[in-house]
Image: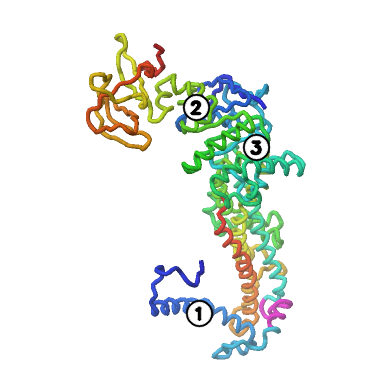
Amino acid sequence: MAGVSFRDVKKNFGAVKVIHGVTMDVDDGEFVVIVGPSGCGKSTLLRMVAGLERISSGEISIGDRVVNDIEPMDRDIAMVFQNYALYPHMSVRQNMAYGLKIRKMSTADIEKRVHRAAEILELGTYLDRKPRELSGGQRQRVAMGRAIVREPKVFLFDEPLSNLDAKLRVQMRVELQALHRRLGTTSLYVTHDQVEAMTLAHRMIVMNAGRAEQIGAPIDVYQKPATTFVAGFIGSPPMNLFPTKVGGRPVLLGVRPEHLEPCAASDADYTADIILVEPLGADTLAHGSIEGTTMIARLPAATHVAEGKLPLRFDPAHRHYFEPDTGARIEV
Amino acid sequence: MNLSSPPSGMVENRPWLTFFSHAILVAGVLLVAFPLYITFVASTLTLEQILSVPMPLVPGDQFWNNYTQVITAGSQRGAAAPVGRMMLNSLVVALVVPLGKISISIISAFAIVYFKFPLRNFFFWMIFVTLMLPVEVRIIPTFKVAADLGILNSYAGLTLPLIASATATFLFRQFFMTIPDELAEAARIDGAGPMRFFVDVLLPLSKTSMAALFVIQFIYGWNQYLWPLLITTDESMYTTVIGIKRMITGGDALTEWHLVMATAMLALLPPALVVMLMQKWFVKGLVETEK
């Protein structure tokens, strides 16, 4: 077991800079989620840890060893791909055993490891099937099995749940958490889904355009987003940002949709023009605008809202201020 | 699903339509099969019977005589080489050409798709450009090269120039490009080097493509006419297709048509067999999309 550390890691494809310098330490046994929109460089960062992309500058170490020039197979990592990348012509058993066979492990040891992985993932009855005879969720489990049997120091997950349907995704998310609790292996997990990031991560890295905008525990990131980008990306629907002035200085005021509540007109901080009401069952989303800025409020399901004027207030404890130009957080 | 009873509603039940479509099918079969039947009948008659008008339309009693003569001795009036030897030559060509083509093409496609080397695209386009030059266009220079190499009248001469194939390289390249990159990456993480990946993953996945290519190229090799005609002057190196041509001497009376027809029947057999035996593979390849 080992941690992973990034020392000012940069990546460029020709003249195009994709990663602008990431520095971070992932602790031994930690589950770190790298989250961001597509094209933000999150997959590239993961692939650099795997050794599938060269590191343009900086250093990545796994344990105490700098791995910049080490082949993927010798890095002591295992990777789970979005499209599973199972060998289509091999059975589940062969898929899991392939890497071990190449390492010239004895047949008995391979059998033992494969059986243990199959037992953990409840794949026992499928060992002799081909990937095409399995459902999406089962294939994803085989891909994880292939990672587990290698007993690596670090698991790398590249959007492993993106190809699954919504229901299965929730189920696999829970299984992944259970698996991590059981094995305790350091894990790096890439996703564009902020719910996966919030639920799985011990700590998350929110990436935007090749930069790590914020690194921290999910709840800290949620409660204190470091930039307007993070404020918009983590939390759904995104945080409302209203241009305003504090002490004569222009700032952006951030209020999450769930922190807006309807009130009497006399108590209102703002009056919104509501143009659309979406009852979701558990709560109700009210879309509209305040002084020309579009906004969303998440209201309790019991609230009766109609289109038109709606007086709203918010708890000052839940407000955020950001620099209008740079988007950086201002602490008040 | 039972093919003989399609789901109701899909096919309308109109008796004369059924009759009509069957009539067309039967006519089509007859159109193709009748000349073949005539060939077979002619191969079992004596020359006199064939030349008589009208030619009998039922098989004669010369089957055994004609076929043994053709296989062991050949025609007496035309080229006299035994067809048995020619069948062997054709078989060598028809086997070596597809096997050679498949091995060379799959390796070049592997290099082009999975390795980054200088001028990679240039080499691919060079291979691609040769697609535009059929054998006939470059046949004189190719003959000159073969002659200089001293491989006239040899199996090497018969097969080597036909082995290089842009079409097959292109086909494998296209197939490899449909294999997700992650598969190669997963193999790399598993510790498989390039050749190991080629043997353990790419080759098994290409099985059905290889089978299809084999059938097509077997027939291509077996039916070669122009190239063997140029490169062989020795009767012992003739292929069957050349053999048939050589038996036809000119005047109708001089040609031993019963032997020509017997040879034609023999020449038909191997490609037909290959197609029939490999058909299962095609179907399998179509049903299992392993990707």
Amino acid type assigned to the residue bearing label 1 in the image:
Leu
The amino acid on which the numbered mark 2 sits, given as a three-letter code, is: Val
| CA separation in Å, label 1 and label 2 | 67 Å
Say whether mark 2 and mark 1 are on the same chain. no
Q: Name the residue under label 3.
A: A148
Q: Which chain carries label 2?
A: A
The percent coordinates of residue A14 (x first, y second) are 52, 28
SS assignment at label 2 = strand
Name the mark on residue A251. none
Picture residue at 52% right of the left edge, 26% below the top = A12
Query: Which portion, as a residue range, is magenta?
Result: B66-78
A103 in magenta: no
Q: Which chain carries label 1?
A: B
Circles 1 and 2, Cβ within 8 Å, touching? The answer is: no
- Image location (x, y in percent) of residue A17: 49, 25
**Chain-order first, disc 3 or disc 2:** 2
Name the residue: 66% across, 43% down.
A119
Q: Is residue B229 visible?
A: no
Q: What residue does disc 2 label?
A: A18
Q: Mark 3 lies on which chain?
A: A
- From the image, tell me which residue sits under label 1: B30
A329 vs B94, nearest the viewer: A329
Quarter of the image for residue A51 reads: top right
Q: How many marks?
A: 3
Q: Which amino acid does label 3 sit on?
A: Ile
Observer-nearest of B44 and A19: A19
> Looking at the picture, how far across and down is residue B30, in whole percent?
50, 79
